[in-house]
Amino acid sequence: MADTVAPRLYACYNCHSHVALHDDIVSKTFQARHGRAFLFSHVMNVVVGEKEDRHLITGLHRVADVSCSDCGEVLGWMYDKAYQESQKYKEGKTVLEKFKIVKHNW
């Protein structure tokens, strides 16, 4: 019988609820308020907050905070709209701050 390999996951640092798969990382070079952050193509077990325009390092974007669905901890933000053409690739993707997530199943 073959061993099944569980996917490498990231979890909320506060309650350890699974929030993202390692394979869904688009970029590890993002910068957040408190340091490094990762851009994910897909996240899970999060609640998306109210959309608002924010001036970020790369310009004006419409974003919404994302929080852990279990404990409510704000983990990062989701890009709803990029106003600059060069930033459109971020739309629909989510940034999670590195210090707010922990590795699980590594």
Image (tube, grey):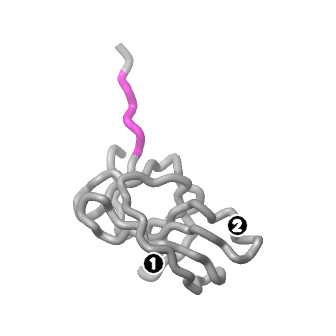
Q: Residues within 10 Å of mark 2 (few under 14, many from 20)?
A: some
Q: Quickly name the residue at label 1.
A: 35
Left or right side of 17 for 43: right
Q: Amino acid at mark 2?
A: Lys
Distance (Cα) linking label 1 and label 2: 23 Å
Q: In this rendering, would 26 be left or right of 68?
A: right
> In this view, which residue lies farthest toward the bottom?
55
Q: Which residue is mark 2?
A: 88
Which residue is at 51% across, 63% downward?
Answer: 94
Relative vertical location of residue 23 with respect to residue 6 in this rendering, above or below? below
Residue at left offset 23%, top offset 59%: 15
Determine which quarter of the picture holds residue 39: bottom right
Residue 61 higher or lower than 98, as above or below: below
Q: Earlier in the sequence, mark 1 or mark 2?
A: 1
Q: Amino acid at mark 1?
A: Gly
Question: Is residue 10 among the parts visible in the rendering?
Answer: no
Residue at left offset 35%, top offset 13%: 1
Labels 1, 2: front one? 2
Residue 21: x percent and y percent? 45, 48
Question: Of residues 53 and 21, which is closer to you in this image?
Answer: 53
Q: Secondary structure at mark 1?
A: strand
Residue 50: which quarter of the image?
bottom left
In this picture, which residue range is highlighted in magenta? Answer: 3-8
